[in-house]
Image: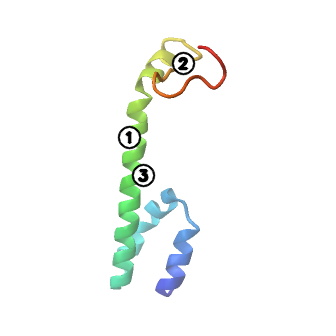
């Protein structure tokens, strides 16, 4: 597979699928493939950090849901006012 074909093929995969094929791609000795792997590793690392950040933001909601609360809401004191009327 040429480097251009590999790039096109990878664009059609999800990040999870790419993560699964990276070990196989690491066996390819071409410098272009090595650079491609590095770029996807950066994307995967960024995605993992985003997920960890989101998990951290949701920890309070998860805690309340475990206690039986069905609806959890939040308010933001910044801004111009509520969109749907007074809170």
Q: What label sits on residue 52 in the rendered view? A: 1
| Mark 2 closeness class: few <14, some 14–19, many ≥20 residues within 10 Å | few
Q: Between marks 1 and 3, how big is the CA–CA gap?
A: 9 Å
Choose the circle earlier in sequence order: 1 or 3.
3
Q: Residue at x 55, y 77 (%)?
A: 8
Q: Residue at x 35, y 61 (%)?
A: 42
Residue holding disc 2: 72
Bin the neighbour count of mark 3 within 10 Å (Cα to Cα): few under 14, some 14-19, many 20 and up: few
Relative to residue 32, is residue 38 depicted above or below? Answer: above
Helix, strand, or loop for circle 3? helix
Give the CA distance from mark 2 to mark 3.
Answer: 26 Å
Look at discs 1 and 2 and give the one toward the viewer: 2
* Mark before the other along the chain sequence, 1 or 2: 1
Q: Secondary structure at mark 1?
A: helix
Q: How many marks?
A: 3
Looking at the image, do the residues carrying marks 2 and 3 touch, with CB atoms under 8 Å apart?
no
Mark 3 highlights which residue? 47
Residue 13 in picture, x, y percent from top left: 56, 65
Using the rendered view, name the quadrant where residue 85 is placed.
top right
* Side (left or right) of 80 relative to 59: right
Residue most extreme to the front: 80
Q: Is residue 82 above or below residue 37?
A: above
> Which part of the image, by quadrant, shows the C terminus?
top right
- Residue 45: x and y in percent read 36, 55
First reached walking from the N terminus: tag 2 or tag 3: 3
Q: In whole angstroms, how far apart are the C-alphas of marks 1 and 2?
A: 20 Å
Q: Pinpoint residue 73: horizontal percent, then vertical percent.
A: 54, 19
Residue 12, image x and y in percent?
59, 68
Q: Is residue 13 above or below residue 26?
A: above
Regarding residue 46, the answer to whether it shows in the image is yes
- Binning the other alpha carbons within 10 Å of mark 1 as few (below 14), some (14 to 19) or many (20 upward) gives few
* Residue drawn at 50 percent across, 79 percent down: 6
């Amino acid at each position: 597979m040429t480097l251009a074909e590999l790039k096109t093929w990878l664009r059609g995969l999800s990040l999870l699928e790419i993560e699964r094929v990276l070990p196989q791609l690491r066996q390819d000795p071409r410098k272009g493939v090595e650079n491609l792997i590095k770029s996807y590793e950066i994307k995967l690392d960024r995605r993992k950090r985003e997920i960890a950040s989101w998990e951290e933001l949701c920890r309070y909601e998860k805690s309340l849901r475990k206690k039986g609360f069905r609806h959890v809401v939040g308010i933001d004191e910044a801004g111009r006012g509520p969109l749907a009327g007074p809170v």
